[in-house]
Amino acid sequence: MNLGRWHLIRAESDNWRIFVDMVNVGAFQLIVSVAVIGKDLIVAKQFGTTGAMDAFLLAFLLPSLVMNTVKVNGSFDVAFIPEFIRVQEQEGDHKAGMLFSNILGAYLFFLFVLSLVLLLFSPGILSWLTSGFETQTKTLTQSLFL
């Protein structure tokens, strides 16, 4: 088989493009995972096992828990992408862009409202979560949360 023909087949193959895209997404996910591990190592080195580390972890816990609970990544992608492609193919790029803009705007508004709810309820929740902490550590937790 001619090598030039192999490159042409490979470049035109839907399966090949899907594979390349999958590898790209996997590579970026690996980079993000390494960055997260690096962040965790830096935080552990900086705070150690002190009250400051406990304050950091609890301040991070509440928004992380809420975002993981309401995360729409998995189900959103499955529902949105086919509809986006359908609108793009049947109604054009402009309508697909409008759909994307509307969904993004609604999602950002939802995140804003969720942030306000967290802000309003954080003093009570954080005081319950930090009930065994010293006053200085409680204050640090609230500060880091905000």
Image: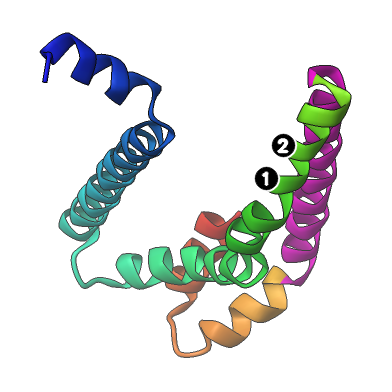
**Compared to 96, does 109 lie above or below?**
below
**What is the quadrant of the C terminus in the image?**
bottom right
Relative side of 6 to 22, left or right: left
Relative side of 26 to 67, left or right: left
Secondary structure type for disc 2 = helix
Q: Does the magenta segment cover residue 54? A: no
Q: CA distance from mark 2 to mark 1?
A: 6 Å
In the image, what residue type sits under mark 2? Ile
Q: Are marks 2 and 1 in contact (CB under 8 Å)?
A: yes
Percent x, y of residue 16: 33, 34
Residue marked by disc 1: 81
Q: Which residue lies at the image location 18% right of the left edge and 55% below the top edge?
A: 41
Would you call the spot at circle 2 few (<14 residues within 10 Å), some (14-19), or many (20 or more)?
Answer: some
| Residue closest to the eye, 110 or 44 | 110
Residue marked by disc 2: 85
Task: State the image quarter where residue 53 is shown.
Answer: bottom left
Percent x, y of residue 13: 38, 29
Q: Which residue lies at the image location 38% right of the left edge and 31% below the top edge?
A: 17
Give the main secondary structure, helix, strand or loop, of the magenta stretch: helix
Labelled disc at residue 142? none
Task: State the image quarter where residue 104 is shown.
Answer: top right
| Residue closest to the eye, 126 or 19 | 19
**Compared to 120, does 88 lie above or below?**
above
Would you call the spot at circle 1 few (<14 residues within 10 Å), some (14-19), or many (20 or more)?
Answer: few
Q: Which residue lies at the image location 22% right of the left edge and 14% below the top edge?
A: 5
In the image, what residue type sits under mark 1? Ile
Task: State the image quarter where residue 67 is shown.
Answer: bottom right
Q: Which residues are magenta?
A: 93-121
**What is the quadrant of the N terminus in the image?**
top left
